[in-house]
Amino acid sequence: MLLSLQGATVRFGGRAVLDGVGLEVAEHEIVCVLGPSGSGKSTLLRAVAGLQPLDAGRVSLDGHDQGGVPAHRRGVGLMFQDHQLFPQRDVGANVAFGLRMHGAGKGQQDERVRELLDLVGLPGAGRRAVAALSGGEQQRVALARALAPRPRLLMLDEPLGQLDRSLRERLVVELRELFGRLGTTVLAVTHDQGEAFALADRVVVMRDGRIAQSGTPLEVWQRPADEFVARFLGFENVVDGTVTGEAADTAWGKVPVPPGAAQGARSVLVRPAGVRLVAAGEGLRCTVAARTFKGTHVAVQLHPSEGDGPRLEAACALREAPEVGDAVGVEFDAAEIVVLG
Amino acid sequence: MDLARTEVRPRQGVRNAAARLGLVAVPVAFFAVFFAYPVAAIVTRGLKTGGTWQFGRITDVLAQPDIRHVLWFTTWQALVSTALTLLVALPGAYVFARFDFPGKQVLRAVVTVPFVLPTVVVGTAFLALVGRGGLLDEWWGVRLDTTVWAILLAHVFFNYAVVVRTVGGLWAQLDPRQEEAARMLGASRLTAWRTVTLPALAPAVAAAALMVFLFTFTSFGVVQILGGPTFSTLEVEIYRQTSEIFDLSTAAVLTLIQFVAVGAVLALHAWTVRRRETALRLVDASMTARRPRGAGEWGLLAGVVGSIAVLLFLPLAVLVQRSLDAPDFGYYRALTRSDGGVFLVAPIEAVGNSLEYALAATAIAVVVGGLAATALTRRDAGRFVRGFDALLMLPLGVSAVTVGFGFLISLDEPPLDLRQSWILVPLAQALVGVPFVVRTMLPVLRAVDHRLREAAAVLGATPWRVWREIDLPMVRRALLIAAGFAFAVSLGEFGATVFIARPDNPTLPVAVARLLGRAGDLNYGQAMALSTILMVVCAVALLILERLRTDRTGEF
């Protein structure tokens, strides 16, 4: 394993910001740590970089314990959240900084800087002042600077956090392509699930300093480990119930579950696509409380008229969406239902 | 898990502690040898006779009526000086903070010149204005040099800049929209100012007032020259007891009393400065100033400019005029002659001495102060290091005379006999200069985003490379400003130097004081001429600094 964390713990005051985290990253793998703010993901990167001493546990790179190895000798790259470009140097000098620190000659530096600026799509920008760059350009320079000394592990802290949406969606594709081509090993953190899923080979969801789930984007999306992960991924239709056989008894009535689901008292997730609207009088009786246009579909908020179940969200085709106030019936589709851990 | 923790912690802790110790070692050693040791010597000298401590000495000295008179005068003149300075300078702070007008930059520089002027020059200038044969004496027959007013006015002159810098600096950065928000909620202009601006300014006003109080409480050169036999501050009394009455024991007790008073004021100052750092909405100073509007605002501007002209500019102009009073620059030419009277050498040689001493003192102050400031900015700076911060300020307030007296009685015998060494004067001057260096460097070093250092470290820079590549380029300007301040302060340093400068190697301020101490028009004129030279050197140094200054650099 290129990177391996065992029981990594960091406490600020009495609070554990990292709480016994174990994580492994293989060579050429792109791992994305996903979590809400305050979940400890930035601290995780800082601990690997050697900027934050561990209170317990260990960080190993290529099998070597990094305890006591200062940041500048770890050979990892870190791209900071707000880039932290050196304001008194131009673009070229920023990119060359790490090369200079590693004792590269002038000619070597110039060549590598040119190569990297081409790579990130800023050819010939070496003499520009960093203050004159746009947000997207700064991000590219920061990436070039981090890549220049060929770190064995590249870490990205909210790599696209400051940028506007369309730019983010374009850059995340570029990044994935670039890392694939270079074979870079990447550990990134983000709070944006779309970014994580688009970038990563493997997604690690963090909660309160612990790892809540780890898996491929598809696995995490299809089978969230628990209610926290499900809600963090944006699923709102989560309800407590008792699973017996292929049905769960919930506040929404009897809900079918896939065969082989865990039995007993569980949380049950119903994806919006699994909420089927039928004629009023059939299934669970609901009233339409709100509808939100989502581009490809309409999200319909339903208020159950019987029982004390929470609101339900359904995804409807544009033309079939009912109006606010309409009475509808709801049936559930077992294929879109997940019994959570 | 717990086992692992005990394994990691100490290793990390030891390394950080070692780094911190390395940075702090030089400043600590410097202060231990050249500050703590002399002060301890004073205490021993004053309170220990025949191997036993005599704490009764303190009450004995305090019981003397003339000493009580000195204490009372020292305190009330400092209070009145502070009040007068605030009264005159606060409108100035407002005008500089909120108004844009032609010549503002020049005027701001002019206002700051007095602060770096040697106290001896200030005293001499006021003597030329309000003393015997002075301008007011010639015109209206008015003399103030036998009254306390000369001292008070000189103190206002000297400290005007402290208030304008400290209060005006913050005022200029307060977001005017805060006041506008209060206005929109129904507050009148005055109420908005009273409820929004004043509370934000209060800690800065308090800090400035305490600084002025400290400077005037320990005032030496000004009172020495303008006070005559009637008025004497603690500082002057300590000097008198040491060099005229030779009662070292009383001098030591007085030093202790001053030490305690200054310590209390400094503690209060540190507290107000900490409060000043509470979150305020600060904006770029250039955004808040505008042209004055209406007769009231133009009138205020005119009043401030007028008071600066009369209080700050006039004394210096008179000084220059008096120095040119003899035909063909007679006083200046007299400086080059050695008549064997006042000095063993021609007075003009004091210029060379002063420059050499000041350069050496600047070098020492920059190294010691720079290391101390770097140690103080380390993120892991603990309570010990922060306590060191307050300690560094002590020499600023503990008065130059204490330092000089301490050097005199502690560094003149083995193990450390520096009496014959030229380095003694620069060391004393550096001690007074270090607080300025630290205060100038600290805010700039603290403003360097720590993550820039981390970014450099992750790219492979060693801690030393990080300092050279990240910190140094950003603080280079502040370092120059700090050096300039240390230079100006060393150049004008009087209280300590007067104790330890050798008769054949006087500095400029010492030479001026000696010339003033002798009768005759020629000596008086030469004093004016030397003071003018000193003023020009200091003013030039300051104006160069003013060009380097940015808004963020320092508290002075």
Image: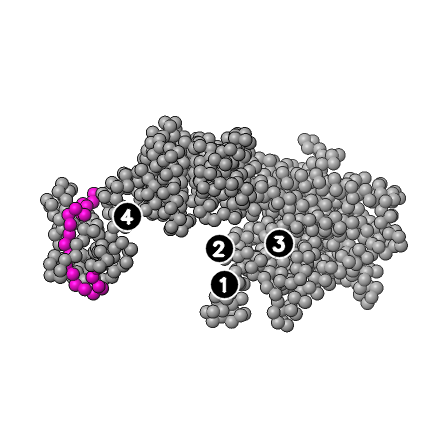
Q: Residues within 10 Å of mark 2 (few under 14, many from 20)?
A: few
* 4 or 1: mark nearer the eye: 4
Asked if the stretch drawn in magenta spans residue A335, the answer is: yes
Above or below: residue B490 compared with residue B139:
above
Q: Secondary structure at mark 1?
A: helix
> Which badge, 3 or 1, is on the more N-terminal residue?
1
Nearest the viewer among A215 and B420 is A215
**Amino acid at circle 1:** Gln
Badge 4 and badge 1 both on one subunit: no
Identity of the residue drawn at 70% across and 38% down: B360
**Amino acid at circle 2:** Ala
The reply to whether the C-beta atoms of the residues labelled 4 and 1 are less than 8 Å apart is: no
* 3 or 2: mark nearer the eye: 2
* 2 or 4: mark nearer the eye: 4
Q: CA distance from mark 3 to mark 1?
A: 28 Å
Q: CA distance from mark 2 to mark 1?
A: 13 Å
The reply to whether the C-beta atoms of the residues labelled 4 and 3 are less than 8 Å apart is: no
> Which badge, 3 or 2, is on the more N-terminal residue?
3
Q: Secondary structure at mark 4?
A: loop
Residue topped by disc 3: B211
Badge 2 and badge 4 both on one subunit: no
Query: Chain letter of disc 4?
Result: A
In the displayed structure image, the side of residue A305 where residue A16 appears, left or right: right
Nearest the viewer among A63 and B525 is A63
Which mark, residue B178? 1
**Amino acid at circle 4:** Leu
Identity of the residue drawn at 45% across and 48% down: A135
In the displayed structure image, the side of residue A260 where residue A65 appears, left or right: right
Residue topped by disc 2: B279
Nearest the viewer among B411 and B313 is B313
